[in-house]
Image: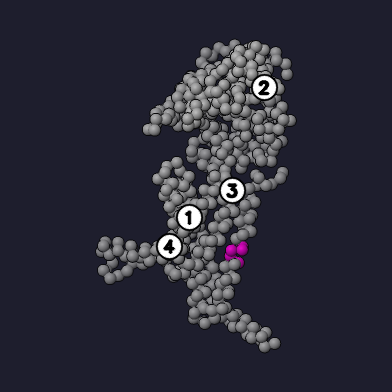
Amino acid sequence: MSASLATAANAKPSLDTTAAISVKDMRKCFGDHEVLKGISLEAHKGDVISILGSSGSGKSTLLRCINLLETPDSGEVRVDGELIRMKQSRDGHQTPADIHQVERIRADLAMVFQSFNLWSHMTVLENLVAAPVHVLKRPRAECLEQAEALLKRVGIWERRNYYPPHMSGGQQQRAAIARALAMNPKVMLFDEPTSALDPELVGEVLRVMRSLAEEGRTMLVVTHEMGFARDVSSKVMFLHKGEVDSLGEPKEMFARPPTQQFKQFITNFNK
Amino acid sequence: MEFFGSLLEQLSTAYDLLAAGWGVQLLWGIGWTLAVTTVSMVIGAVLGSLVAAAKLSHRGGLRFLGESYTTVFRGEPELLVIYLFYYGGTQVLTGMARSAGSIGSTDILNMPSFLGGVLAVGIISGAYQAEVFRGSFLAIHRGELEAARAYGMSTFLRFRLVIMPQVLRLAVPGLGNVWQLTIKDSALISVTGVAELMLTANKAARSTHHSLLFYTVAGILYLVMTSVSTPIFDKAERYTSRSFTRPK
């Protein structure tokens, strides 16, 4: 895949000035350990932001705080301009003020997990229609039709009646991406989607993700795939010890690492 | 030769006794035993899931109540719990009825024997089922629960679409075990006067003086009930775990 194609797709001018996702000064501690030390991030429609960082840098926690799988200690999250309202609980922690709002917003932020997390008692097709039918309350027939089309797109339509444990990791992850697409999400969150895969299966998943980027999907991707970060994403964010170390255009970042930390990080990776 | 002669004689006596009406009574006994066991299992399933939920709760108070329930009812002799519910229940009911003036001051209002019995056995069964449900819940892959949250499912939807089907799948082998325990516990209900298999065998043994015969027959019938249930639960297990075992 040539880099120019990806750039052309990402260069689409964004007329919408509201950020699809905006995170302001997010902090999160686990016990005494401060994992996120005030992170801000903005993703506009069509942005593909790769979030890089060594293990323990807080990149997965950042993603999980955006859809409130983890509750941030402080900071703001806005999705399409809408602020996720928080309140102070009795023990001094923040909790969501309105769980229904959180559930509604989560449905707009489909997540793809490192370990796939398909529902193992449902067939692939059932996995794809469960949330659209029950959460979005769309007609079942319509959801099934869309699910079949999505499975064709990710290349596992023949496996639609399989149970996830009977499929390879790469097939499961492609099914999980199709499940995310079935929500017609505003933003897709990828949490190390290729890290649990055997090396020979990484390619098939990356190809699907690349095609999503090319059609202008808004994506936040926590990853260790340097090739994807450099060639496909529109922005690269490098986290170091819970802070944004550097942020910028991928070509520029990789050609001239702006910080010593980032330079070190990519050097270690290329070893 | 003499031994076989006497065995034949025994068998023909046995046949006569069973044909004379004890056979039908024993069949009724089986019916009542299955009824007691089934109703107790259902009571136990309701209590067991509530207790399991309490034990898994974030609230310390609920956890304490759940822990106490399973500790007490798994730790006490079953017979004691049955006495407690039947005779204790009778005492409480009588006291309430007397103070309400609906019965005379010397009358006694008995706890209905079936109700007292199935409550006691159901509560014990619930303590064991609670442990089965709790273990099953903990065996669900955490990521699947997380995915359900991440896709906007409410607590109720998560329970209905993801937790319940998987808990049932994982609980089948354990429930088969509890079912066998409950069949055996149901024999203890005979002390309250429910005409289940044990009580019927007792009655037959006492009034005919053929203890060996009737207890042996009852023993065989219990064994038939417990062993017939094994392949049924096996089949249920194969069905509910098809997503893991069936190669396509």
Image location of residue B223, percent across then percent down: 59, 67
- Choose the circle earlier in sequence order: 4 or 1: 4
In this rendering, do the residues under marks 4 and 2 share a single chain?
Answer: no
Work out how far the residue at label 2 is from the one at label 1, CA to CA, in angstroms: 55 Å
Vertically, is B93 above or below A130?
A: below
Image location of residue A139, percent across then percent down: 56, 33
| Residue A69 located within the stretch drawn in magenta | no
User: Which residue is labeled 3 in the image?
Assistant: B169
Q: Secondary structure at mark 2?
A: helix
Q: What crowding class fits label 1: few (fewer than 14 Cα within 10 Å), some (14-19), or many (20 or more)? A: many
In this rendering, do the residues under marks 1 and 3 share a single chain?
Answer: yes
Image location of residue A58, percent across then percent down: 55, 26
> In percent of the image, x 46 and y 22: which residue is there?
A75
Amino acid beneath label 3 = Arg
Q: Secondary structure at mark 1?
A: helix
Work out how far the residue at label 3 is from the one at label 4, CA to CA, in angstroms: 31 Å
Amino acid beneath label 1 = Ala
User: Which residue is labeled 4 in the image?
Assistant: B81
Q: Depth check: B25 or A39 in front?
A: A39
Tell me which chain the residue with mark 1 is part of: B
Work out how far the residue at label 4 is from the one at label 2, CA to CA, in angstroms: 67 Å
Q: Which residues are magenta?
A: B224-228
Vertically, is A65 above or below B233?
A: above
Tell me which chain the residue with mark 2 is part of: A
User: Which residue is labeled 1 in the image?
Assistant: B127
